[in-house]
Image: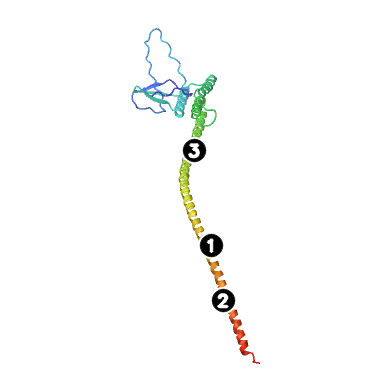
Amino acid sequence: MLPSTESLLKYENPELVSKTTEKISPKAQPLKDTPQQPAISGPVLPPPKTKSPSYDAIKQQTEEILNAILPPREWMENNQLFVQRVSSTPCTRTDVIHLQEELDLKLQQRQARDTGICPVRRELYTQCFDELIRQITINCAERGVLLLRVRDEIRMTIDAYQTLYESSVAFGMRKALQSEQGKSDMEKKIADLENEKTELERQVNELKAKCEVIEKQESERRQVEEKKHTEEIQFLKRTNQQLKTQLDAIVAPRK
């Protein structure tokens, strides 16, 4: 399947690697077809001047670093394995200006958000940052490796925040479910307590009514007892008075 060509990262032209499904290592060097030697006709021209070994070594080292930092893209098409490596061509000021214009255009075309969390904006800026790493690595490999550390650290931080966000969302969902379950249990407990309260209030009212009846009965009985006691005292006083009168009459001397 062909990879998306709409990338801000600059790649070389795709190369046919193999007709099998076996993939190559990301650090493998591009395979080039051996050019055929033309037939010699006319005067023999002097061989072209070859570049210094130091330049070839530096270029090969730069390509290896680029392939390690930004691995090549691989895809299958018609049972053929294609590979596309990042470009090792140095950039110019015009390329940087074109990269900025291309970034603004893609942000507008894909309707990326200006603020907040936006996967589209993050993807485009990631591609732009990779392209800047590629351009800087060609000029200074050490600076490119240092920028790679910065990029990986930023990705690790974002992944950590994403993991923390997902775990917090899961924790919040669990707490919400627990609160919903606890809410239903609490509502049931409140209903039971209200029923118990109503029953206790009914019992209290019944006991109050019984107390009022008992108090009324006791008050009436006490009044009856007091009346009876008063009548008995009155009777005893009269009897005592009569006996005293009789005793005085008996004891008094006859004239």
Of residues 112 and 135, the one drawn nearer to the viewer in this rendering: 112
Q: In the image, what residue type sits under mark 2? A: Glu
Q: Position of residue 14 (x, y in %)?
A: 41, 21
Check residue 212 in the rendering and tell me which mark sits there, or answer none: 1
The Cα–Cα distance between marks 2 and 3, rounded to whole angstroms, is: 95 Å
Q: Give the mark nearer the N terminus: 1 vs 2.
A: 1
| Residue nearest the observer in this picture, 159 or 24 | 159
Q: Which residue is mark 2?
A: 232
- Please tell me whether residue 177 is drawn above or below residue 80 in the rendered image: below
Nearer the N terminus, badge 2 or badge 3? 3
Using residue 234 as the reference point, say whether residue 170 is left or right of it. left
Name the residue beneath numbered marker 3.
165
For marks 2 and 3, give the one nearer the viewer.
2
- When asked about the image quadrant of residue 44, the answer is top left
For badge 3, the amino acid type reads Tyr
Label 2: which secondary element:
helix
